[in-house]
Image (tube, helix red, strand yellow):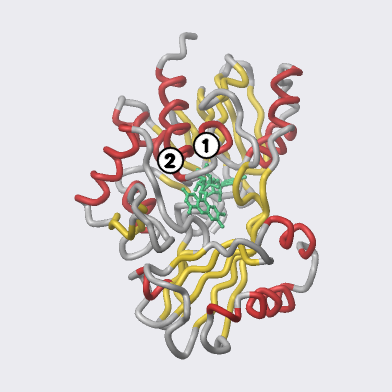
């Protein structure tokens, strides 16, 4: 249904991934009226899960780790809320590292939990932005218009830059160069239903040392799928070489490359391509104020580390930059 009315808030947040959600929650709890604009059908971005028949797959982020006290405390909250669960301490025989957390029942449970009590317009892809010197006006592909004095962009950096260019927003030249220099890995995620148990070793995740497969997970051994179901991630090199190829053929190649861990030929599969999977280089600050008036801030995992934790730390930093901003 096209949105015709213009909605206003104190802060518009583009993107309901971990960075956008952590920022929105902190802003809202500090008294700001926040509106999140998300192009997807649900929240989470790269924290993605999918149901196919009886099977459940995490096909983006596979697990969460915490190095900082702030993010550890957030995971403890999610555990208490029943949406995060300890998966393992690592994936090799001598695993004894820090805890790998998974979502419960699956990874997207965490962003769904974070969304509670936030205002989100889903299936709303922002395609244009501009301002009148005081207030941002952003437009969506379904005819919506949204206004606010503060704008936070949390999409992968090339997508945020594309949006900035729609509004002819001039960025300081060193900043633009830095942002243009941020590159991302690509990744195909194959989600394959199996007729019997896979050969992926316990606890259900494995990163081969060579070949086209970067990671393979058994979602049943992981504890999120009722029936045998594997997620296969391709390497960046394979993804780049085959990005334009027919997806069915790409999926079959990756299934062949993973055959040693499958046990049997999959009954069916789906494939998703992550064009911006993980940033290969990180901006030197946890968020960036790209323009003061009206305020424009960029955040996401490219600003504080190529993981869910980095995205959360960046979201919090962006919220603090907005709260501390003096007109
Ligand atoms: C295959 C894969 C495996 C991974 N494995 C791990 C792992 O095991 N552990 C780990 O910690 N991390 C992992 N990561 C990385 C982790 O998922 C990310 O670092 C983190 O989720 C990024 O969050 P974000 O909020 O910065 O970005 P995103 O999650 O990408 O969120 C950005 C949001 O913006 C939305 N958006 C974009 N453009 C627009 C627009 N124009 N209008 C409206 N909305 C828009 C998108 O739909 C998306 O929801 C993995 C990622 C991938 C893809």
Labelled pair 1, 2 in contact (Cβ < 8 Å): yes
Which residue corresponds to the image point at 28% horizontal and 57% vertical from the top-left?
Answer: 85
Q: Secondary structure at mark 1?
A: loop
* CA neighbours of label 2 inside 10 A, class few (<14), some (14 to 19), many (20+): many
Horizontal relation, residue 59 to residue 214: left or right? left
Which residue corresponds to the image point at 64% horizontal and 58% vertical from the top-left?
Answer: 187
Task: Name the quadrant of the N terminus.
Answer: bottom right
Question: Based on the displayed image, in which of its 4 quarters is residue 71 positioned?
Answer: top left
- Label 1 and label 2: CA atoms lie apart by 7 Å
Which residue corresponds to the image point at 48% horizontal and 59% vertical from the top-left?
Answer: 48
Which residue corresponds to the image point at 43% horizontal and 61% vertical from the top-left?
Answer: 92
Horizontal relation, residue 66 to residue 129: left or right? left
Question: Based on the displayed image, in which of its 4 quarters is residue 219 positioned?
Answer: bottom left
Residue that label 1 marks: 305
- Label 1, ligand 1: CB separation under 8 Å: yes
- 196 or 138, which lies in front? 196
> Which residue extends farthest front?
94
- 102 or 247, which lies in front? 102
- Label 2, ligand 1: CB separation under 8 Å: yes
Q: Position of residue 32 (x, y in %)?
A: 36, 27
Residue that label 2 marks: 309
């Amino acid at each position: 249904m096209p949105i015709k009315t213009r909605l206003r808030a104190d802060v518009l947040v583009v993107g309901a991934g971990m960075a956008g959600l952590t920022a929105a929650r902190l802003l809202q709890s500090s008294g700001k009226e926040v509106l999140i604009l998300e192009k997807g059908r649900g929240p989470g971005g790269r924290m993605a899960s999918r149901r196919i028949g009886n099977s459940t797959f995490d096909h983006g982020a596979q697990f969460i780790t915490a190095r900082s006290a702030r993010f550890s405390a957030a995971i403890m909250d999610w555990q208490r809320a029943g949406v995060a669960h300890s998966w393992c301490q690592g994936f090799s025989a001598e695993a004894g590292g820090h805890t790998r957390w998974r979502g419960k029942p699956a990874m997207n449970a965490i962003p769904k939990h974070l969304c509670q009590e936030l205002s989100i317009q889903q299936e709303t892809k922002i395609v244009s932005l501009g301002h009148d010197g005081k207030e941002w006006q952003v437009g969506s592909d379904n005819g919506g218009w949204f206004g606010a004095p503060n704008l936070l962009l949390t999409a992968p950096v090339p997508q945020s830059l594309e949006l900035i260019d729609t509004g002819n927003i001039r960025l300081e030249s060193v900043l633009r160069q830095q942002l243009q220099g941020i590159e991302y890995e690509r990744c195909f995620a194959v989600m394959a239903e199996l007729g019997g148990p896979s050969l992926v070793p316990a606890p259900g995740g494995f990163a081969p040392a060579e070949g086209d497969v970067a990671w393979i997970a058994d979602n049943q051994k992981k504890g999120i799928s009722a029936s045998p179901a594997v997620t296969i991630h391709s390497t960046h090199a394979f993804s780049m070489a085959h990005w334009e190829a027919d997806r069915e053929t790409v999926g079959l190649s990756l299934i062949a490359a993973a055959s040693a861990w499958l046990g049997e030929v999959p009954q069916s599969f789906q494939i998703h391509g992550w064009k911006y999977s993980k940033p290969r280089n990180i901006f030197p600050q946890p968020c960036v104020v790209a323009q003061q008036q009206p305020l424009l801030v960029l955040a996401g995992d490219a600003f504080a580390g190529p993981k869910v934790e980095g995205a959360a730390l960046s979201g919090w930093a962006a919220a603090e930059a907005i709260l501390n901003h003096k007109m």
